[in-house]
Amino acid sequence: MSYTALYRKIRPRTFKNIVGQPHIVRALVNQLVSGQVSHAYLFCGTRGTGKTSAAKILARAINCPEQQDGEPCNECEMCKSILAERCLDVAEIDAASNNGVENIRDLRDEVKYLPNEGQFKVYIVDEVHMLSGAAFNALLKTLEEPPSHVIFILATTDPQKIPATILSRCQRYDFRRISAVDMVAALRGHLEGEDVDFEEAALDYIAYHSDGAMRDAVSLLDQCISFGEGEGLSLAKVREVLGAVDRAQLFEFTDALATADTAAIIGIIASAMDAGRDVSQFANDLVRHFRDVLVAGLTDGEAKLKEQAGRVSKENLMRYIAAFSETIREMKFVPHMRTAFEVCALKICMPVETQQARHVEMPASPVSVPLGAVNSKTSTTVVETPARPVSAPPGEVLSKTSTPASGYVNSRERTSLAIAGKGELIRPSWKRFCLKLPIPIRSICVRCEVEEVNGMLKIYCGDETSQKLIEGKQAIIREQLADFFNLTTPPNLAIEVREAYNKPIEKTEEPPLPGTHGRAAPGNGSDQPEPPPQEEDDWATMEQVQEMSPGDEEW
């Protein structure tokens, strides 16, 4: 036994049966009465608002010989042929599956021929935004100047994807979302015609969950009628089909959030889940309820919603909406949706101060100086003391020459947070550090410059190609940085492109051996005079870094 879905059975057959689009109906009927029918129409709007139904009615009305006041008679042979979809003069094309340029070329060849039965050949192209760019270009000229016997009706849910050259050649009609009042009236008329008992609250609930789409409302109505065959339509059955919770529970849940009553929150969730409700539907219903309470507090809304708006602040309602909306997105990827939903509710109940404390950034750790080392610039000897962190005032970072009485952090206990004070250490040692990198990435990094910004090491390169190569080797660079500079945790990197750093590799000499003070090695054959002795560098050379062990006191 074949069964026809309810939304197909009650599809509008005349313009006056189209629900919620009076502005479009009036314009089309006036064109048909006056005979000023355009050669191309574009029907835009969300799903289930009547775009395809209006296109089919317009196709019949154009070709109907018994047309009255712009309406097709649906009784003549031409109307019956179009309704039965056996008329060759009316073609409905699915652009989602016929989106190639070859399909449009075939259509362009067909429009040259005169209609077989009617006065016009009508092409209804559904989801026209799915056509490819080449297909749009192939359609352009035909759409601009079609033969006098051809009319195009394009329908789409995404007009932003249609080229402006196509839009400018069509009369555009935007189908609005259908209001709940119009939707309930249409559903009520159908149920009364079918002699089905119903509760008014059930129709309101169906319209509320259909989000302005008449087809969604009719499909849901069809499902609910089948669920309670012979028993009529009740609000309880609609909720059971949807897996939605009772509206009273939404009010109770909102009050529990406002008073941070975690026991009541867990109890309401458990009660809803035990009754077989869907947790994702529960979350969606809550977000809508928060929105309704928020709007009722700002305008004249339902008395019960306005009463709750007086108990819950607008700021909290907006915070609830943001938190649960984010959780709804996350629930699509978590293995246990109920847990994610409960955690979201419990986090909202936490004091705001506690939540903010979790996001307070730690102050930058001071720069550590090797134990027993001598600073040549200040001639200050650091006293060897047990390694422990140094406390610095908020926002203040100890400089390299600071000598607090409590001592310094041991170099082997540095963390990635300490990078905030080591820009002075990493920058001059960057070229030497690059020698430790693998050959493919070494030649790229040695051209770059580095800078410490907000506890993160920024690497500036000269072009996007270098940026992508460095990003692909971030893990290796971070590990080598932690090893070279003795960081417990690899630092975070940020790679940016700056044309100023696209410079050739400078030829650098090998680092001087310890104790040579920068003088040329004996027997190097250099004719240049020896440079004057320089101060000994505070920092270890690469050879010394490689030879030092974790137990070396000099380090």
Image (tube, grey):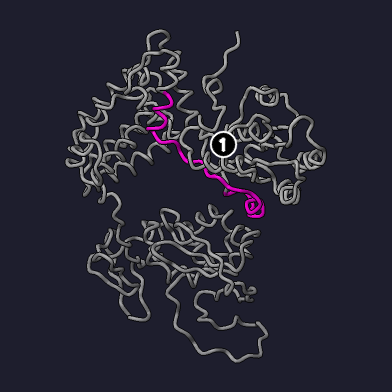
For the N terminus, the quadrant is: top right
* Residue 410: percent from left, percent from top: 34, 60
Q: Residue furthest bottom?
A: 529
Q: Report the front residue among 514 and 397.
A: 397
The one of 166 and 97 positioned closer to us in this rendering:
166
The residue drawn where x is 23% and y is 39% is 349
Locate residue 269 relative to residue 130 in the image: left or right: left
> In the picture, residue 312 is in which quadrant?
top left
Residue 41, percent from left and from top: 63, 44
State the extent of the magenta-drawn residues as a range: 160-187
318 or 208, nearer to the observer: 208
Residue 373 vs 487, above or below: the answer is below
Q: Quadrant of the C terminus?
A: bottom left
Query: The disc labelled 1 sits on which kind of residue?
Result: Lys
Q: Point out residue 548 in the picture as x, y percentages from the top left corner.
A: 47, 61
Residue 225's image quarter?
Answer: top left
For residue 4, above or below residue 504 = above
Q: Sort mark 1 into few (<14), some (14-19) or many (20+) by Cα contacts within 10 Å.
A: many
Q: Decide whether residue 178 is among the magenta residues.
A: yes
Indicate whether residue 228 is drawn in magenta.
Answer: no
Residue 74 rendering spot, x and y as whole percentages: 62, 24
Where 337 sits versus 458, above or below?
above
What residue would you read off at disc 1?
A: 51
Q: Secondary structure at mark 1?
A: helix
Q: Locate residue 431 relative to residue 335 in the image: left or right.
A: right
Number of marks in the rendered image? 1
Residue at x 56%, y 29% (from the top left corner)? 14
Which image quadrant is residue 181 in?
Answer: top left
Residue beneath the point at 37% across and 58% down: 417
